[in-house]
Amino acid sequence: MAERLSLTFFASRLLPTGKALLPHFQLKQPHQLPLNSLSSFSTISRRRPVSLSQSLQRKGSIVRSYAGSPVSVTSFASDPDQLKKAREDIRQLLKTTFCHPIMVRLGWHDAGTYNKNIEEWPQRGGANGSLRFEIELKHAANAGLVNALKLLQPIKEKYSGVTYADLFQLASATAIEEAGGPKIPMKYGRVDANGPDQCPEEGRLPDAGPPSPADHLRDVFYRMGLNDKDIVALSGAHTLGRSRPERSGWGKPETKYTKDGPGAPGGQSWTVQWLKFDNSYFKDIKEKRDEDLLVLPTDAVLFEDPSFKEYAEKYASDQDAFFKDYAEAHAKLSNLGAKFDPPEGFSVDEEPPATTEKFVAASYSTEGSKKRELSDAMKQKIRAEYEAIGGSPDKPLKSNYFLNIMILVAALAFLTSLLGS
Ligand code: HEM
């Protein structure tokens, strides 16, 4: 719903100013911007000074680095605890607004400007949050993405210790997972580009209808350092969402699958269940069975180019293979051009399950002084043995008449045999 009201609203109120939507060092001018507008995105990339209590909280808190080793959090680009909380808020947002597709597109368009031939950050583009600036939002390829920013704005305000670059990628990966897609092996700690002058030039993202779609896709994705498998797997993200003629110029204004929403109605989807992440994108393109489903020239080529086709066929028949390759390619995409702090990034996923207890052949010598606890299985075994002879490990002897009689009989027999001899 929020999506419905905001595009024209923002387009008319903000974009014509010609200024950066989110100028980093510029003071807010409340009279120019509506309340609850993107003006508050100006509290951006540089971390706010950390308060003493925050700094104490952070010091000594331990998270797992992406490499798996525990590291202590002192000065990461984003605060891991805040990232986790932001993820919960994103989950709620997705449940109430069905904005999964646009969040995925937002993350992709921030990262997809990466140029591997440029070494300097942030000039090389990529996942650095620069898409929050008006100049980049106004690129034709980004039409409509201002709505995604608006939805994320309150979350950014609540968690100022999370960078935009991380927030965009967090929202995208969470959207995939919440729509039923694979778990993406994400890492965080992306540093934000901090001014509109650091935005990439227009034209780095792909066109949907170029003269030679396969060549064009390779030009664009190879420039990002991605390969044919990544191109096909990532295109599978079109299993979610719709194309709207008033934004990209592609698609029908509405179809039988989109006329009632969910979310803002309208547009043309690639799949019937366009809020469910599965492999139906590949199946539907292959079968070409429904006029109401969209196939862009860059989608169709996935079943025409021999190298792309190999993957597209595989994904159409094997959802697990698609999920596996998609998760890998998505994680790769989300890291493009990013500068991480700490340099190796960190994960905010739950700790890996503890490994099973290590087998120790013999450790008697050092353990002598420690009280050793019996395992439950051993306790049960001992109890069963006691009970078999009418006893109990809790009160072994007092009530164990049978055992006492047996001992008495044995002693008498022993004495008798002694006397006899
Ligand atoms: C391969 C080249 C690609 C082309 C030419 C392309 C083109 C497009 C176009 C024209 C739209 C419609 C936008 C609109 O009208 O609102 C769109 C939407 C979308 N794209 Fe792509 N795309 C490409 C790759 C990707 C990739 C790599 C991803 C993600 C990993 C992606 C995710 C999406 C999503 C989720 C939507 C739906 C957005 C919504 O419903 O609001 N696309 N894309």
Image (cartoon, rainbow, N blue to C red):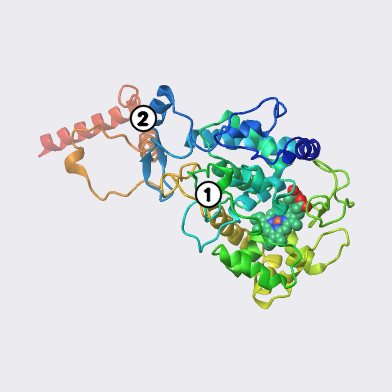
Q: Earlier in the sequence, mark 2 or mark 1?
A: 1
x, y percent for residue 277 = 70, 52
- Helix, strand or loop at mark 1: loop
Quadrant placement of the N terminus: top right
Relative to 324, is 371 on the left or the right? left
Which quadrant of the view contains residue 249? bottom right
* Residue at (55% x, 50% y) in the render: 127
Q: Secondary structure at mark 2?
A: loop
The residue that label 2 is drawn on is 391
Q: What type is the residue that disc 2 sits on? A: Gly
Task: Classify the position of the C terminus by image quarter.
Answer: top left
Q: Which mark is residue 151?
A: none
Tell us which disc is closer to us: 2 or 1: 1
Total of numbered circles in the picture? 2
The residue at 21%/38% (across/down) is 367
- Give how far across and how far down residue 331 sits, in percent: 55, 54
Q: Is residue 242 visible?
A: no
Residue at the spot 62% in from the left edge and 42% down from the top edge: 132
Picture coordinates of residue 11 (x, y %)? 76, 40
- Quarter of the image where ligand 1 sits: bottom right
Could you say where residue 160 lies in the image, as x and y percent from the top left? 54, 31
In the rendered structure, find residue 186 and report the number of the disc placed on it.
Answer: 1
Q: CB at mark 2 closer than 8 A to ligand 1?
A: no
Task: Report which quarter residue 99 is drawn in.
Answer: top right
Residue at the location (77% across, 67% down)?
Answer: 297
Question: Front-most of 334 and 85?
Answer: 334
